[in-house]
Amino acid sequence: MELTLIAACQTLDQLKKQLQVAAVAGAMRLLSSRPGERALARLPEEAATGHVGGVSELAASLCERQEALSEVCRLLRHVAETEPLGIRCSHLDDCIQSTVQQILSASQVLVQNPESRAALELLEVCRQAWAECLAALTVLVRDTVDASHEKGSSQSLHRHGDEAEVARLAGGVRERTSELEAEVERWPGGGGGEEEEEDAAVLLCVQNVCNAAYAACLLAKGGGGGGGLHKCTPDLLKKAAVLADECVKLSSLLENIVSKLARGKGRARLGAGVEQARLCVEQARLCLTAVRDASAVPVQEATAKVADVMQAAEDLLATLLPTVQIARTLKEKMGA
């Protein structure tokens, strides 16, 4: 019986590896071929000339592209080696589907109002969001391959190998934090009154996020006073909880700002930004839940979850960055 179970487990592992190879190969083929992107590039011109038939044809091509990409995301989720990777796959699938729907809506608005500058700008925002989805898929494929290779070698590693992995993830968190700081330096000021208070709240929240992220990175890299990762795990999880909590606050602030702009200037125009902000809030809450779950178990068990927590933090910061960019861009356009 035991030998049969071992053989069955080995067969399942082989099947999973084959499925992973197929998923990665399919993703690479889709990313190297650009039929959907060519259709998307022609869409503004066709819609601006009021060519309904051309828009319908291009929309059908884009929908086919979306279905193929969504299928790849689902396959990658099934073969994900870690829970954060699986969450990223599901999140990206949602983003791809919502972005295509926004593109289709924007193209219909533009084909019915060819002279509308607002409709054309909305379509351009949606096209940029589509490009970001493809870039995110490229990173996701790379991380899936890396996770598979790391799992193959991690079984022979001792505790110092786990610490090296956490330190590597901490480097990613620090890099994302630096990008967030650079982006928020471009945040438009002024406006007075309630708008000025909102801007101040955003800047303060970003500073809190960055402080918590840097503190978590310091602990993850062994700067928490010695004793290794095991000793500093409780403090690291506390900092990660602060980071996730501040990210929830920041993403909620951004969602309110974008939604308010949408109410003032027309929701259709800013729909992509509102959806991105909403998804960011969900991602932040998922990260906070993961941190709290890790903190609720004994230190010995929590230490094993630190890598997942740091990966979730990096994913969260990566989601926050484009949301800040969208909010900043919309504020600049509305202030122009």
Image: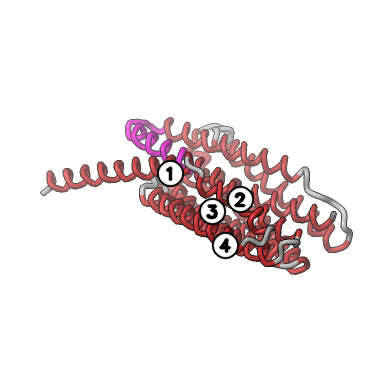
Q: CA distance from mark 2 to mark 1?
A: 23 Å
Query: On the rendered structure, is 142 left or right of 3?
Result: right
Q: CA distance from mark 2 to mark 4?
A: 13 Å
Please tell me whether residue 22 is drawn above or below residue 60 in the rendered image: above
Q: Nearer the viewer, mark 2 or mark 3?
A: 2
* Discs 2, 1 touching: Cβ within 8 Å: no
Going from N to C along the chain, the mark reached first, 3 or 1, is 1
Q: Nearer the viewer, mark 2 or mark 1?
A: 2
Q: Is residue 140 magenta?
A: yes
Q: Which x, y percent locates residue 246?
A: 65, 54
Disc 1 target residue: 27
Please tell me whether residue 202 is drawn above or below residue 263 in the rendered image: above
Q: CA distance from mark 1 to mark 4?
A: 30 Å
Q: Which x, y percent locates residue 44?
A: 65, 54
Disc 4 target residue: 53
**Residue at screen point 55% across, 37% down:** 170
Q: Nearer the viewer, residue 204 or 178?
A: 178
Disc 2 target residue: 42
Q: Nearer the viewer, residue 4 or 116?
A: 116
The residue segment tinted magenta is 139-160
Q: Nearer the viewer, mark 3 or mark 4?
A: 4
Q: Amino acid at mark 1?
A: Ala
Q: CA distance from mark 3 to mark 1?
A: 26 Å
Q: Amino acid at mark 3?
A: Cys
**Magenta portion: prevailing SS class:** helix
Disc 3 target residue: 287
Q: Is residue 104 magenta?
A: no
Going from N to C along the chain, the mark reached first, 1 or 4, is 1
